[in-house]
Image: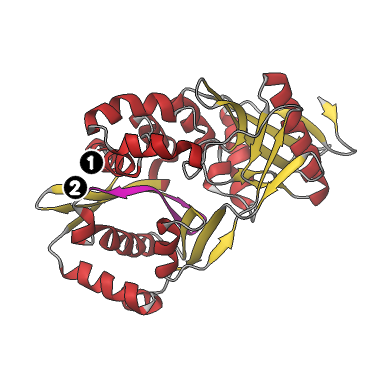
């Protein structure tokens, strides 16, 4: 155990210990900047689902109470290299601390761990380190979040006029909407999501990842699926925490656009989240300048720049996995043309190294 500055000490947490997990879970849920991606449930699920290793560093006071933490995923990929990420396969993470003075020591400890593990890149997707050795990025990604309205009618009124008209049209189409967390829900979601990301030119995550998240989050995660004549055309896996719904892995098939199935899905999710007691809808992140960012803005969600920070070993280049990078353009276009069954066979082996 290494002392930071009295009366705090740093150590690695053991997520195999139920008591440790429960204590960290309570700390994250009580912290104003806590997200589902800081929870032990996320670290455990992504480690199992993608075959990578999770680490959690904690800061404790002299009396043993938690004062800060940073969850980390050790990513090793033959295609994308090695990195320590907070948190892996998430849009958020970074350092949580009760005292601003603890942020830098925790970030420095994360870098020391990266060096020990042989990871030349450390990525903090949220609050992180400061100084000339850190590379800040507040322009690549945007976050979208706003309060939920009190009723469906008020929710419609809160959506800007053009998008409201699309939602009204979606509500008139004969579509079936269901929400659940069982095996048939998981199968329908994976089929839709796999086709959706193939059409975007990116590899699908392992099915094991989605099932692990559903298991670890229990009733704080579920799947909303839209069907047309019994066939799933849009589906999203959502997380719930502290009165906020986080639609995370969502997509639609080629038929979804004409059916306005995504519009129906997200409006139905707003209703479902309200019934679960949620008061806020977090639409997640999108890359600046993309159609996904425009879609969320059209729903009345104000874009907010997200701050990410990287630290890279001397002589190394930062890990680059952004599919918008020109170097990936031909690979993305080629992936879109793959037969779906081929993409589904190869994709999970590639995506598990993205982090």
Inspect the magenta stretch and tell me whether residue 100 lies in it: no
Look at 61% across and 55% down and name the residue there: 139
Give the percent coordinates (x, y) of residue 72: 62, 33
What element does badge 2 sit on?
strand
Q: Left or right: 112 with respect to 331?
A: right
Q: In terms of sequence position, does the residue under pointer 2 or pointer 1 come before the other?
A: 1
Q: How would you rate the neighbour count of disc 1 (Cα within 10 Å): few for under 14, some for 14-19, many for 20 or more?
A: many
Q: In this orientation, which residue lies closer to the viewer: 90 or 279?
A: 90
Find disc 1 in the rendering and name its residue.
188
Q: Left or right: 299 with respect to 184?
A: right
Q: Left or right: 89 with respect to 82?
A: left
Would you say the magenta stretch is mainly helix, strand or loop? strand
Give the percent coordinates (x, y) of residue 201: 35, 40
Specify the farthest residue to the left. Answer: 229
Between marks 2 and 1, how big is the CA–CA gap?
6 Å
Look at 21% across and 38% down and name the residue there: 184
Say whether residue 60 is visible.
no
Residue 232's disc is 2
What element does badge 1 sit on?
helix
Q: How would you rate the neighbour count of disc 2 (Cα within 10 Å): few for under 14, some for 14-19, many for 20 or more?
A: many
Give the percent coordinates (x, y) of residue 50: 45, 27
**Segment tinted magenta in the rendering:** 239-253
Look at 18% across and 60% down and name the residue there: 259
């Amino acid at each position: 155990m290494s002392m930071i500055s009295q009366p705090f000490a740093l150590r690695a947490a053991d997520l195999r210990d139920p008591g440790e997990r429960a204590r960290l879970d309570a700390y994250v849920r009580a912290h104003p900047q806590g997200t589902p991606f800081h929870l032990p449930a996320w670290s455990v699920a992504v480690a199992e689902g993608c075959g990578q290793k999770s680490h959690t560093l904690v800061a404790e006071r002299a009396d043993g109470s938690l004062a800060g933490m940073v969850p980390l995923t050790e990513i090793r990929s033959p295609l994308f290299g090695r990195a320590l990420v907070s948190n892996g396969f998430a849009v958020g993470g970074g350092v949580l601390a009760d005292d601003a003075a603890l942020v830098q020591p925790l970030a420095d400890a994360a870098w020391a761990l990266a060096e020990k593990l042989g990871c030349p890149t450390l990525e903090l997707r949220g609050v992180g380190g400061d100084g000339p050795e850190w590379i800040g990025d507040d322009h690549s990604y945007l976050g979208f979040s706003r309060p939920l309205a009190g009723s469906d009618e008020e929710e419609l009124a809160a959506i800007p006029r053009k998008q409201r008209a699309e939602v009204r049209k979606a509500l008139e189409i004969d579509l079936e909407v269901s929400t659940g967390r069982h095996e048939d829900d998981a199968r329908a979601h994976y089929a839709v999501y796999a086709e959706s990301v193939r059409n975007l030119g990116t590899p699908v995550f392992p099915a094991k990842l989605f099932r692990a998240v559903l298991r670890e989050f229990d009733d704080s995660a579920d799947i909303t699926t839209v069907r047309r004549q019994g066939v799933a055309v849009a589906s999203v896996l959502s997380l719930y925490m502290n009165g906020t719904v986080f639609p995370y892995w969502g997509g639609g098939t080629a038929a979804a656009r004409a059916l306005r199935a995504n519009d129906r899905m997200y409006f139905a999710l707003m209703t479902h989240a309200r019934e679960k007691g949620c008061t806020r809808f977090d639409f997640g992140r999108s890359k600046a300048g993309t159609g996904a960012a425009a879609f969320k803005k059209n729903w009345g969600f104000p874009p907010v720049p997200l701050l990410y920070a990287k630290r890279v070993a001397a002589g190394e280049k930062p890990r680059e996995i952004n599919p918008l990078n020109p170097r990936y353009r031909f690979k993305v276009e080629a992936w879109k043309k793959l037969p779906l069954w081929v993409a589904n066979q190869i994709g999970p082996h590639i995506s598990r190294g993205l982090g």
